[in-house]
Amino acid sequence: MNSRPIGIFDSGVGGMTVLAEIAKELPNEDLIYLGDTKNFPYGDKSKENIIKISKKCVEFLISKNVKLIIIACGTATSQALEELRKEFTIPILGIISPTVDSIKKGVKESSKSIIGVIATEGTIRSNKWEQELKEKIEDITVINKACPLLAPMAEQGWTENKVAEETIKEYMSVFRDKNIDKLILGCTHYPLFKELIEKELGNDVEIINTGEKIAQYVTNYLNEQNTNNDKTNKADCKIYLTDTECNFINVVSILLKNSNIENKISKIDIEN
Ligand code: DGL
């Protein structure tokens, strides 16, 4: 047993889609969330910058005595995970490998899968999703599409209005007539657009929310390591933001169906 909290970070509200899934799967685990709103968006920053910022996030979470860190961000996973693992001894999980492993389990041998990936510019530029998918699954075709407008729109809470509808329609047009069977939401802000994406692509395309996959992975991981919290623990969740919350409270209240979210938020400076 290990009663220390799990640390989770992202540039803003997106990683809360991962936190929500973890909270569902692991109701006894205390969670500490860091939303690095000061450095939002991560998606258009250089790899060097993402590594630098991610190190600060990890250091902050370590100072909160977490037992495990989840990078609830596709951009930081794709560009900083390797470096972070070299530098820190604490277990650090990203969103790419658990998702690819889970897809691999579901793919029938010798079936030719066509998988779409949508993510930030930085993630698509890194090519990490395509590399890992092709390394682990035979005979697959990957179609990548960067969707740089979606994370800023999600931060504003523009996930269901006319602008969101038109933007999703435009971004999804690359997948039209391509017969994709799955679409990976490679940025953790994108599950906030899931309904619009489903509407655009139809029911035959499986939409993959990385938060669900990482939550299942973390459940197995804690069981294997025997580092779960006590079953009687009623989980606590603390949220730290590095700058103003933008639309954080509204978005998160919907996501977690929790109107008390204000009381859980503190502002911090991770740079000094
Ligand atoms: N939610 C993040 C991701 O998964 C970051 C989006 C951004 O800050 O641009 O990539």
Image (tube, rainbow, N blue to C red):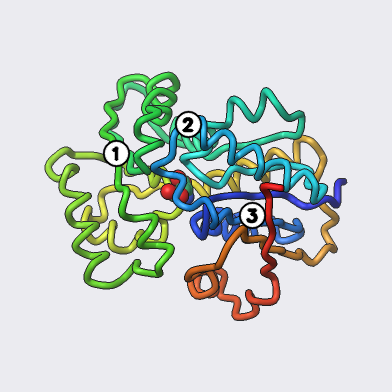
Q: Residue at x 36, y 49 (%)?
A: 207
Q: Residue 243 at what x, y percent from top left? A: 58, 62
- Determine contact: label 2, label 1, CB under 8 Å: no
Number of residues whose C-alpha sits closer than 10 Å to that of mark 2, classed few (under 14), some (14–19) or many (20 or more)? many
Q: Nearer the viewer, residue 212 or 172?
A: 172
Asked if residue 209 shows in the view, the reply is no
- Determine contact: label 1, label 3, CB under 8 Å: no
Closer mark to the observer between disc 3 and disc 2 = 2
Asked if residue 100 shows in the view, the reply is yes
Q: Residue at x 38, y 58 (%)?
A: 152
| Residue carrying label 2 | 47
Left or right placement of residue 41 versus residue 202 in this view: right
Q: Residue 3 at what x, y percent from top left? A: 85, 52
Q: Is residue 180 above or below residue 206?
A: above
**Residue 55 figure quarter:** top right
Q: Residue 23 at what x, y percent from top left? A: 65, 60
Closer mark to the observer between disc 1 and disc 3 = 3
Q: Is mark 2 within 8 Å of ligand 1?
A: no
Of callouts 1 and 3, the N-terminal one? 3
What's the residue type where badge 1 is placed?
Answer: Gly
| Residue carrying label 1 | 116
Of callouts 3 and 2, the N-terminal one? 3
- Residue at mark 1 to residue at mark 3: CA–CA distance: 29 Å
Q: Residue at x 29, y 30 (%)?
A: 142
Circle 3 — which element? strand
- Residue at mark 3 to residue at mark 2: CA–CA distance: 20 Å
Left or right placement of residue 116 versus residue 244 in this view: left
Residue projecting furthest to the left? 177
Left or right placement of residue 159 versus residue 267 in this view: left
Disc number at residue 34? 3
